[in-house]
Structures are given as structure tokens and as C-alpha cells.
Image (spheres, grey):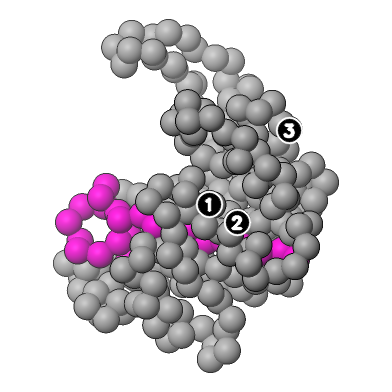
Amino acid sequence: MTIAAILAGGIGSRMGNLGTPKQYLVVGGKPILVHTVEKFWVHPEVDHVVVLTPAAWVGRTDDILRKFLPKNHGVAVIAGGDSRNNTLRCALAYVKENFEGDDHVLITHDAVRPFVTHRIITDNIAAALKYGACDTVIPAVDTIVRSDDGEMISDIPPRKSMYQGQTPQSFRCAELALLMDSLTKEEEAVLTDACKIFALKNAAVALVRGEVHNIKITYPHDLKVAHALLGLEAPSNDALADEALSEAGG
């Protein structure tokens, strides 16, 4: 069984004062979240999709999906945790409670990366089955500079070995759950994403080639890029906020 977990817990603080989480902003006539969910919902190798949102948005999110997807779409909406790591635990618990066996693949993906491709999803599933874990990346185009104190350069790593992480990140559920259960408090405190768990435990993580246009919509500029990728003119912030609140029932 292959389950896609769409992580929709962000509040969009870096998007500005739009009054609604960024995953509910409307691009091309429907919320960003819907664009993202559709990519996994139509993929023939994805058996089930679950969306994890803040508890207060579970009902609204379900209403939105019912509006834009067919009547019996089968996409589950559940509450996530108070952090990305705890949301990941919620996804694993959901899989354990709803599907028999422990040989499932879990594809985790940011709700605000609506331009993920069929090929990326397919490659993630294959890599997770073969290696146990994989991360979607693109080669770093710019030189990466490391600074330990934020004031002076500490190191400039060779660019040819540097990559920019995207999502999906995909895993065999049993391996991910085992490693998460083995984390110390100190290890959990430094986690930035799920693949870091494998890195901390010296477990292999395969690379899956991403795409430059598989962007994460984080800042207002990203919305303009998203509209451009769809061949649309970007609306004003006020229009975005009004439309998003309308879709969310606000």
C-alpha cells in the first residue's frame, strides 16, 4: 500500500497578513492545497491520500476537498501535530490504524508544492521500495556558503556535492517508525525534516531528481511565480485573501 501524506499544517506567517494559511490561497481558480492533492489522487500507484492540517481547519479542509474533488474522493483529513515531526507521527499512526501490515510506503509532501510531477512521484515510490528512504533534490546552482555565527564565513563546500532539498520525501513506514522511536531528545531537537532522521542514524537515503519548478510557495513572490507557471496574471494580496476566505467558508 502506498499512502501520500500531504502536510498542510503551516500558518503562512512569511506570506504576510492575508488572514488565512497559505495552502488555502487560490491559484488558477482553486486553493493551492487542492492542486497538490490532485497530483497524488490521480497517480495510479498512490492507493490513498491523507491531508494533515491544524485541528481547527480539519472541517473546512474537508469541505474544500469535497467541493473540488469528485463526490466519493476518498481523501482523508486529520489533525496534525504541533510540529512537523509530530505531524509525521500522526501520519504514521494513521497508517497503522487504518491499514494492515507494515510494508507500506509513505510519501510525505508539502501542501504548498503544487507543481510536483507524475515522474517525481513515480521515482519516489520506486526509490522508497528499493532503498527504504529517499529525498527529492535539485543540484545547487549557486555556491553554498556556511557560517556558524551568521557573521563570518566558516566554509564554502564544493558546489558539485551540494543539493537543494524539495519534497516529496518517501519512506518504508516500518523503517521510519523504528528510527523515529529511537531518537533521543537531543537528536529530535536538531531535526529539520524526516530525512534528517535517517542521516542522524547513519541510514541510507537515496536521491530522487526534482524539478526547478517544483517550488514551495512561501513568500508573496512565490505566488507570482505560481501564477506565471499556470500562465495567469497574479492577483493583488487583497483579492487573494478574499478568495481564500471565501473558499474556506470564512
Q: Amino acid at mark 3?
A: Ala
* Mark 1, residue position: 88
Task: Judge the density around disc 1: few (<14), some (14-19), many (≥20) Cα neighbours within 10 Å.
Answer: many
- Asked if the magenta segment contains residue 53, the reply would be no
Q: Earlier in the sequence, mark 1 or mark 3?
A: 1
From the top left corner, tell me how far across and down residue 1 is, in percent: 75, 66
Of the 4 image quadrants, the one containing the C terminus is: bottom left
Q: Amino acid at mark 1?
A: Leu
Q: Please count the marks in the image.
A: 3
Tell me the CA gap for discs 2 and 1.
6 Å
From the top left corner, tell me how far across and down residue 78 is, in percent: 47, 69
Closer to the camera in the image, 197 or 8: 197
* Mark 3, residue position: 204
SS class, disc 3? loop
Numbered disc in front, either 1 or 3: 1
Residue 205 falls in image quadrant: top right
**Labels 2 & 1 near each other (Cβ < 8 A):** yes
